[in-house]
Image: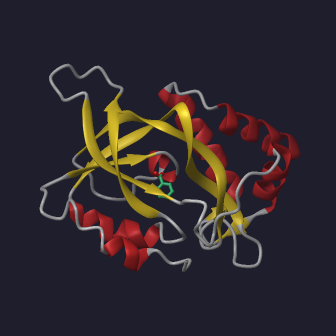
Amino acid sequence: MSLDTTAANRLMTHFDDHDSVWLFGYGSLIWKADFDYLERRPASIRGWTRRFWQGSHDHRGTPDAPGRVVTLVPEDGAICHGMAYRIPPSVFGPLDIREKNGYLRVITPMAFEDAATDAPAQAEGVVYLAGEDNAAYLGPAAEVEIARQIAASHGPSGPNRDYLLNLAAALRELGFDDAHVFELERAVLEIA
Ligand code: BEZ
């Protein structure tokens, strides 16, 4: 599979005729929403867990020394907390380019976690997933090894460390627990 998933994502036209689409963010989309959105709501998806198992050759590392960023891994009973954005479908164009290193747009149900009683509690939308068959996938490793790689990696978007620390801070701010992310945060801060 090619590293660049932009062309594959353009074939995902399911929501093109909708006025807006819910996009579930579980990584950089939580703390870096540099796109137009109509509203945003804390949300979760079931059956997936967040893991720093995807290589970053273009943002937080380089082709020779990739960093590590998050993807979602299937896990029975797991709940992944994040932030959902209601976006016009035109936003997918730039996002497909920003997230082109192995991520594919996949349709998912999501549950909203705010207390807005007059709004729907669930929706179908989109999540970007980097599966284990993509060329940039690095897969599992001991958390201390992942932390060392994150502490050492830099790319055009900045230090890999900042990606992890921003994600941990955003999850904490939202009141979400994530043992994997918080353990990596602790280990990276210890290395520093
Ligand atoms: C996200 O924050 O949902 C996200 C993570 C990786 C790639 C694309 C989106």
Q: As rendered, which of 37 and 99 lies closer to the eye?
A: 99
Work out which quarter of the rendered image holds the N terminus and state it.
bottom right
Which residue sits at x=46%, y=52%? 32
Task: Give x and y (percent) for residue 168.
Answer: 61, 38
Q: Residue furthest front?
A: 76
* Image vertical order of residue 163 relative to residue 110, above or below: below
Relative side of 38 to 171, left or right: left
**x and y percentages locating residue 132 in the rendered image:** 61, 60
Please state if 142 lies on the left or on the right of 11 as rendered.
Answer: right
* Quarter of the rendering containing residue 109: top left
Where is 183 relative to 188, above or below?
above
Residue at horizontal 39 percent and vertical 75 percent from the top:
8
Residue at point 44%, 57% (across, down): 128
Against 149, residue 90 (above or below) is below
Point out residue 152 in the picture as x, y percentages from the top left corner: 81, 61
Q: Which of these two is toward me, 26 or 153?
A: 26
